[in-house]
Amino acid sequence: MKYLQIDPQLFIKNRKKFAAQMAPNSIAVFNSNDVFSTGADSTLPFHQHRNIFYLSGVDQEESILVLCPDAKNDAHKEILFLKETNDYIAIWEGAKLNKKQATQTSGVQTIYWLDDFETIFEQLLNDVNLVYFNNNDHYRQAVEMETREDRFIKAVKTKFPKHKIEPNFPIMEALRGVKEPEEIALIQQACTITEKGFKRVLGFVKPGVIEYEIEAEYAHEFLRNRSKGFAYTPIIGSGFNACVLHYIENNQRCKAGDMLLMDVGAEYANYASDMTRTIPVSGRFTARQKAVYQAVLNVKNEATKMLLPGTIWEEYHVEVGKLMTSELLGLGLIDKADVQNEDPKWPAYKKYFMHGTSHHMGLDTHDFGALKTPMLPNMVFTVEPGIYIQEEQMGIRLEDDVVIQSNGAPLNLMKNIPIEIDEIETLMNA
């Protein structure tokens, strides 16, 4: 791993929190993600399942975490099963965790090789009547393939039909939504790396560069700062491309006079950052660009102030819509008649700002986290309003990552990333 080792106390705390929410006489199993083939002998880079990483810090394939708080054998209350390493694997693939290293990484004291899993799992099932399986019910999930977890669940249902089975998502959603201080520090590190990438790009962008060249500048800075790279597929769109919300081709030449929207973020230790900045390709904003940019910035600043303990996510978005409506009226993009005659299900402002403003962020860019209950301290949210004017071939979005605080204004983890008009122009023309 490129990142520095994480204190295992984080994972010990996370397991205690999860175990405290488990029903009596239950067991929870967490599998690593699969390694996916691309054809022949090639595979995609491995990405660990976020839940097993959250609970153990183990960042390698073919690993299983088992939690069984009521196990009769105290040594089996927490178990990690790992692929047994050897000299051959060490030479051809790189060394995997041995048992001592696994304990140092996770804080789990009982480590077995995978060959022992079935035997020990069956023994543990004699002490429990409920199995928590590792599922994904995220509101934006789009799973189109059978996962290692899916195969495990099928096997359990077939072989142990008398055991009750429940998803762990309700527990994980609540836990992962509220970050520990160590997690916030890791997200801050990801944001700091993103800051370095953005400042590098400000000195690079000029008319004639190609969007993928800008992507390469970010990648260079991310990798040299212990990141694996982008936390998500980067969006780098100039001109009309900035109006395409999920534009990822990044293959067009940037033209003088255009605005350039960059929705990028570095990951660090599997934790994401999520930044959007929009800059003038020529290094100076036109009067029109300044007006639209400042309108977006005004909404972002005011929306950020509303991210307080007790705020309801759905109600928050309604209030942000009112802020955007006011700014669009000021820009002349909509008028009072548009507002008076709007469809409540698709307000007038949605013509130019059609997406949401905030989502949970953490181990996933769109992280697990409760959305129907009041916001809590140490939740991390993005704030990302935008205005997209297709007829002017201009899209402007601004985004920061903030932590809800128990007292006072939210903590902006991207406060050092330039965003004011004067800052941008000064740095681009230095």
Image (cartoon, rainbow, N blue to C red):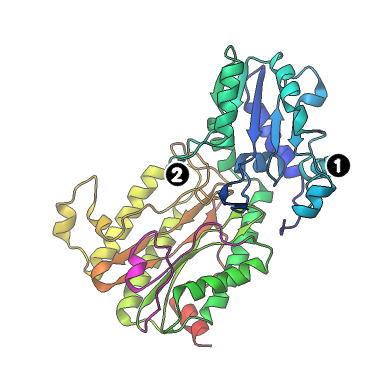
- 67 left or right of 241? right
The amino acid on which the numbered mark 1 sits, given as a three-letter code, is Lys
Residue 184 horizontal/vertical position (percent): 63, 52
Q: Which mark is residue 100?
A: 1
- 362 left or right of 315? right
Is residue 394 visible in the rendered image? The answer is yes
Q: Chief secondary structure of the magenta span?
A: loop
- 126 left or right of 149? right
Label 2: element kind: loop
- Name which of mark 1 and mark 2 comes first in the sequence: 1
Q: Quadrant of the N terminus?
A: bottom right
Residue placed at 45% from the left, 81% from the top? 209
Residue placed at 81% from the left, 48% from the top? 88
Q: Which residues are magenta?
A: 229-256
* Residue 100 versus residue 164 in the image, above or below: below
Q: Which mark is residue 311?
A: 2
Q: Which mark is residue 140?
A: none
Indicate which label's residue lies in the foreground, 1 or 2: 1
Residue nearest the viewer, comparing 334 with 51: 51
Q: Is residue 235 magenta?
A: yes
Residue placed at 60% from the left, 21% from the top? 156
Q: Name the image quarter holding residue 385.
A: bottom left
Residue projecting furthest to the front: 40
Residue 201 horizontal/vertical position (percent): 53, 76
Is residue 171 visible in the rendered image? The answer is no
Residue 406 horizontal/vertical position (percent): 57, 47
CA gap between label 1 and label 2 equals 45 Å
The amino acid on which the numbered mark 2 sits, given as a three-letter code, is Thr
Mark 2 residue crowding within 10 angstroms, few (<14) / some (14–19) / many (20+) = some
